[in-house]
Image (cartoon, rainbow, N blue to C red):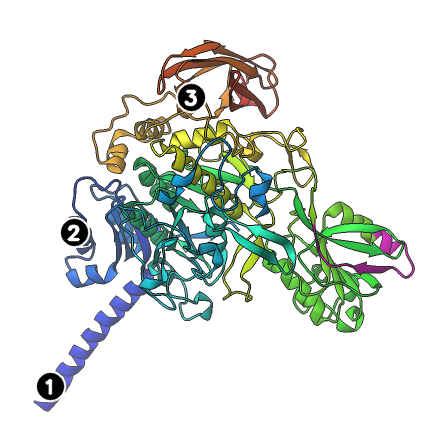
C-alpha cells in the first residue's frame, strides 16, 4: 500500500512538473503585442474591456485566468484595442478574428533629439504676440506632450499670474516617485506616465530608468515642452553660452504631460495608451518628438499613425518630428494627417577657434567652455594606437584604443562616422583618459553638431579635417591650440537645413510630400532636468527640437482660430512658409551647402508672421483621409474596421495625389496627369486671386481656372492642375504653384518624377 501511495505521489508530481514546464515554455515564448481594432464606435469603455478579455479567453482555450494574466492594457477612449502577452500562434489567431484591423509587436521608437523665436520674428516676452493679432486666448489651449516627462519646478513651467485651469479639462495629475498630485499647477495641468510596454521588453532593474512617475529624468521632455510653451525666463544660459532671456512659442498655453519614453526609448503599447488618454483628457494639440526607424511600416501597424489618425478625427492637431537620419527617403511619421517637421539652423552658432602652428585659424563646432592655455603637439589618433588595436581603429578613438605614452600632452585628431552625440562626447573622454590635452574631431558625416566635450575640443567637417591632416603630415613639429567655445550671432546662411534632418521622398506613399515644413532644430537652448548633469537648461539639436517650435505656432493659431480644423492649420503653416533665407536667397542644405528642395524642407521654413492670415486654405475632413486610404489599397472591409461607421470607398480618389493636400506630388508622370484641389476662403469676404506657376523643369503645368473670385468667408472653389511631360527630366524635379493677390501668396510645392511612356522607365 505504501509503495502504491509513493508511486501515485510521484505520478502527480510528474504531472504537475510537466504542466509547470509547459506554462513556463509558453510564457518564455510569448511577447507583448498590440491588437488594434479601429475606432471606439458606440461601445462603452467597460464593454470594450469585457470583449477584449473575451477574445483573450478564446486564444487561451477557455482559461479566464490565463486571459487575465496575459492582458496588459485596453484602449477604450480614442480608439479600440488592447495589449497582451501572446505567442506568435495566438497573435496570428487573434489577427483573424472579426473586428481586428492589425496585430503587431510592441516596437520601440526613438527620440528625435530661445533665440530661435527672435530669429523667426515673434515679439513680446510673455505672450508672444504676432503683430496685428491678439493671441491671449492661448491660456485656453492645451498641448499634450508625449515624451520623457517633465521637471515641473523649472522656472519655464511657473504658473505665476496664470488663470484657473480651462473648464472641460478631464485629465489628472498621476502620483508616482518624487511626484504627487499637488506637483501640477495652472501651467502643467496634467501628468501621466506609462510603463507597461517598457517593462515587458526591458530589464527594469536598471537604475537608468529613474523616476517611475511623470518626472523627467533625461531632460528631453522638459526641453521640448519649454520650447513650445515655456514661460519667459531671464538669464538663461548653458555654461555661459547663449546667455539671455528665453521662452516658448506659446508661453501662456497649458501643458499636459504623457511620459512614455524611458532610458532606452518609447514602446508602442505605451504610446497608444498616451494617445488614448490624451483624446479623453481634452488636449487640443499633441506633440511628439519621436518616431520609428526608417523605413516606416504600414500606417495601421504603426502606433503613431494609428493614435494620430483617431486624434485628428476628433479635431486634435498632431505634430511630429521627421527623424535624424539625414539621408534621402529617411523621413518618418509619414501619415498625411500628421504635420511632420524638418530641422533647420538659426543665425546662432557655437564655435571654437583652432590655431595651428603655422598661424592658420580654423573654426570648429563646440559647446565646451574649456580652452588650452598654450599650444601643444598635434598628432592623428592613429599614431597613438594601443595593444591589439590597428591604427585605423584607433583613428576613431575607440575605448581603450589609445596608447597613453604616445597621447599624453598632445592634441589628438580623431574621426567620427556615426550620428550619436553621446559617442562624440565619449571620444573626448577616451582622449582625456589617455592623457590628451585636446581633441579635434573630424565628423565624416558632416553633421555639424556642437557637443559639450570634457576637454578643449571642436568638431570639423571632412574638408577642414583634410586640411588639418595635411598640415600635420607636412610639418616637422605640428602644433595646435584650441580655444573655448563662443556664441556667434549672425552666422550665414540662415536658416539652412541641417545635415541630420531626415529627408523625402515619402517611401510609404510617394504622392504625399514629407516633411511638411522646417523649423529651428540646431543648438536650441531650453529647460532641462537637473537629474541629468545637474543642469537647469541645456542646448540640444535634432528634429526633436524643431517639432515643438512648430507646436508653439500651432498653439498660437489655435488661440486665434479655435474652430479651424487640423488640416486648415497645417495648410496655413505650409502655404505661408518661405523657401528663402534671411538674405532672400534660396535656402541651402548641409553638409555641402547645395540649394535645398521640397524633400529637405517640405513647403519651406515656417513664417509665424503670416500663419494667422493665410487668405486661403486647403482643408480636409476625416472623410477625405478615408478616401485617401481607399486610394492606397484599403478595401471597404478594412475601412469599416478602422472607422466603425458606414464609410465606403465609393468616393475614393483615383490616386493618393488627389488628397486635398497643400503640396502636390506626382511620382510617376507618364504623359498627362491632372489633380483637383479645393481652396477655402478664410480671408476677406470679397477677394480675387490669380495663379502663378513656376513649372518643374521639363514639365508643362497649366491651371484651370487661372483666376478665382470669392464672395464670402468659408466659400470653397475647385481648380485643376494639369501636368504634361515636355522633355523627360531625370529624377524628381521641383516647382511651385501660388495663388496671389495684393495681400497674400498661398504657395504649394510641385514635385514631379516623369516616367518614359515607351520604355516604362522612371527617370
Q: Quadrant location of residue 238?
A: bottom right
Which residue lies at the image location 29% right of the left edge and 50% below the top edge? Answer: 277
> Is residue 54 positioned above or below 757 on the image?
below
How packed mark 2 is, by other alpha carbons closer than 10 Å (few <14, some 14-19, many 20 or more), is few
The extreme bottom residue here reads: 2
Q: Magenta span covers which residues? A: 470-487
> Which numbered mark, 1 or 2, is in the foreground of this view?
2
Q: Nearer the viewer, residue 736 or 466?
A: 736
Q: Nearer the viewer, residue 668 or 230?
A: 230
Separation of disc 1 and disc 3 at Cα? 92 Å
In this picture, residue 733 sits left or right of residue 682: right
Residue 57 visible at all: yes
* N-terminal-most mark, 1 or 2: 1
Are discs 2 and 3 less than 8 Å apart at CB?
A: no
Q: Which residue is mark 2?
A: 46
Secondary structure found at label 3: loop
Q: Which residue is mark 1?
A: 5
Q: Which residue is mark 3?
A: 683
Q: Quadrant location of residue 64?
A: bottom left
Secondary structure found at label 2: helix
Amino acid at each position: 500500500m505504501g509503495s502504491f501511495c509513493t508511486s501515485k505521489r510521484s505520478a502527480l508530481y510528474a504531472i504537475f512538473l510537466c504542466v509547470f514546464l509547459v506554462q513556463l515554455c509558453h510564457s518564455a515564448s510569448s511577447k507583448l503585442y498590440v491588437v488594434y481594432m479601429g475606432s471606439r464606435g458606440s461601445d462603452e469603455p467597460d464593454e470594450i474591456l469585457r470583449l477584449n478579455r473575451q477574445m483573450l479567453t478564446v486564444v487561451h482555450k477557455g482559461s479566464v485566468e490565463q486571459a487575465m494574466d496575459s492582458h496588459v492594457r485596453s484602449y477604450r477612449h480614442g480608439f479600440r484595442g488592447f495589449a497582451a502577452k501572446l505567442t506568435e500562434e495566438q497573435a496570428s489567431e487573434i489577427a483573424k478574428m472579426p473586428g481586428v484591423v492589425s496585430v503587431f509587436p510592441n516596437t520601440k521608437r526613438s527620440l528625435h533629439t530661445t533665440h530661435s523665436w527672435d530669429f523667426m520674428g515673434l515679439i513680446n516676452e510673455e505672450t508672444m504676440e504676432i503683430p496685428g493679432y491678439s493671441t491671449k486666448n492661448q491660456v485656453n489651449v492645451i498641448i499634450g506632450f508625449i515624451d520623457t516627462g517633465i521637471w515641473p519646478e523649472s522656472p519655464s513651467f511657473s504658473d505665476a499670474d496664470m488663470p484657473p485651469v480651462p473648464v472641460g479639462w478631464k485629465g489628472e495629475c498621476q502620483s508616482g516617485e518624487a511626484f504627487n498630485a499637488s506637483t501640477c499647477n495652472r501651467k502643467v495641468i496634467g501628468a501621466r506616465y506609462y510603463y507597461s510596454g517598457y517593462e515587458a521588453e526591458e530589464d527594469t532593474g536598471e537604475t537608468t530608468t529613474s523616476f517611475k512617475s511623470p518626472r523627467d529624468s533625461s531632460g528631453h521632455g522638459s526641453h521640448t515642452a519649454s520650447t513650445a510653451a515655456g514661460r519667459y525666463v531671464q538669464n538663461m544660459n548653458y555654461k555661459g553660452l547663449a546667455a539671455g532671456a528665453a521662452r516658448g512659442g506659446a508661453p501662456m498655453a497649458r501643458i499636459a504631460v504623457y511620459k512614455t519614453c524611458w532610458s532606452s526609448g518609447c514602446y508602442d503599447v505605451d504610446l497608444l495608451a498616451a494617445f488614448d488618454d490624451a483624446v479623453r483628457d481634452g488636449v487640443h494639440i499633441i506633440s511628439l518628438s519621436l518616431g520609428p526607424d526608417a523605413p516606416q511600416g504600414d500606417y495601421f501597424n504603426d502606433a503613431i499613425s494609428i493614435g494620430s489618425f483617431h486624434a485628428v478625427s476628433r479635431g486634435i492637431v498632431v505634430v511630429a518630428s521627421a527623424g535624424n537620419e539625414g539621408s534621402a527617403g529617411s523621413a518618418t511619421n509619414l501619415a498625411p494627417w500628421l504635420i511632420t517637421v524638418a530641422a533647420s539652423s538659426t543665425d546662432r552658432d557655437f564655435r571654437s577657434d583652432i590655431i595651428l602652428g603655422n598661424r592658420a585659424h580654423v573654426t570648429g563646432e563646440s559647446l565646451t567652455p574649456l580652452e588650452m592655455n598654450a599650444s601643444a603637439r598635434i598628432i592623428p589618433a592613429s599614431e597613438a594606437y594601443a595593444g591589439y588595436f590597428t591604427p585605423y581603429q584607433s583613428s576613431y578613438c575607440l575605448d581603450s584604443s589609445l596608447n597613453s605614452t604616445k597621447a599624453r600632452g598632445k592634441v589628438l585628431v580623431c574621426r567620427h562616422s556615426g550620428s550619436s552625440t553621446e559617442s562624440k562626447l565619449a571620444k573626448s573622454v577616451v582622449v582625456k583618459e589617455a592623457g590628451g590635452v585636446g581633441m579635434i574631431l573630424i565628423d565624416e558625416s558632416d553633421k555639424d553638431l556642437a557637443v559639450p566635450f570634457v576637454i578643449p575640443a571642436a568638431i570639423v567637417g571632412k574638408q577642414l579635417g583634410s586640411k588639418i591632416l595635411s598640415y600635420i603630415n607636412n610639418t616637422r613639429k605640428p602644433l595646435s591650440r584650441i580655444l573655448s567655445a563662443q556664441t556667434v550671432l549672425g552666422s550665414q546662411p540662415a536658416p539652412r537645413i541641417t545635415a541630420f534632418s531626415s529627408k523625402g521622398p515619402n517611401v510609404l506613399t510617394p504622392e504625399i510630400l514629407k516633411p511638411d515644413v522646417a523649423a529651428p532644430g540646431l543648438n536650441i537652448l531650453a529647460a532641462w532636468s537637473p537629474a541629468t548633469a545637474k543642469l537647469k537648461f541645456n542646448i540640444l539639436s535634432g528634429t526633436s527640437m524643431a517639432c515643438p517650435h512648430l507646436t508653439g505656432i500651432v498653439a498660437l493659431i489655435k488661440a486665434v482660430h479655435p474652430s479651424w480644423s487640423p488640416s486648415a492649420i497645417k495648410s496655413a503653416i505650409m502655404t505661408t512658409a518661405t523657401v528663402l533665407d534671411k538674405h532672400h536667397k534660396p535656402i541651402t542644405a548641409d553638409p555641402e551647402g547645395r540649394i535645398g528642395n521640397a524633400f529637405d524642407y517640405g513647403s519651406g521654413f515656417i513664417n509665424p508672421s503670416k500663419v494667422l492670415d493665410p487668405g486661403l486654405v486647403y482643408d480636409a475632413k476625416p472623410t477625405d483621409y478615408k478616401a485617401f486610404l481607399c486610394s492606397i489599397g484599403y478595401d471597404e472591409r478594412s475601412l469599416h474596421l478602422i472607422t466603425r461607421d458606414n464609410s465606403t470607398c465609393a468616393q475614393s480618389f483615383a490616386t493618393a495625389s488627389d488628397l486635398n493636400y497643400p503640396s502636390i506630388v506626382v511620382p510617376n508622370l507618364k504623359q498627362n496627369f491632372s489633380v483637383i484641389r479645393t481652396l477655402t476662403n478664410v480671408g476677406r469676404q470679397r477677394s480675387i486671386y490669380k495663379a502663378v506657376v513656376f513649372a518643374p523643369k521639363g514639365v508643362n503645368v497649366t491651371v484651370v481656372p487661372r483666376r478665382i473670385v470669392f464672395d464670402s468667408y468659408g466659400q470653397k472653389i475647385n481648380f485643376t492642375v494639369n501636368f504634361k511631360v515636355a522633355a523627360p527630366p531625370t529624377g524628381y524635379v521641383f516647382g511651385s504653384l501660388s495663388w496671389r493677390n495684393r495681400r497674400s501668396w498661398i504657395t504649394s510645392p510641385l514635385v514631379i518624377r516623369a516616367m518614359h511612356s515607351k520604355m516604362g522607365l522612371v527617370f
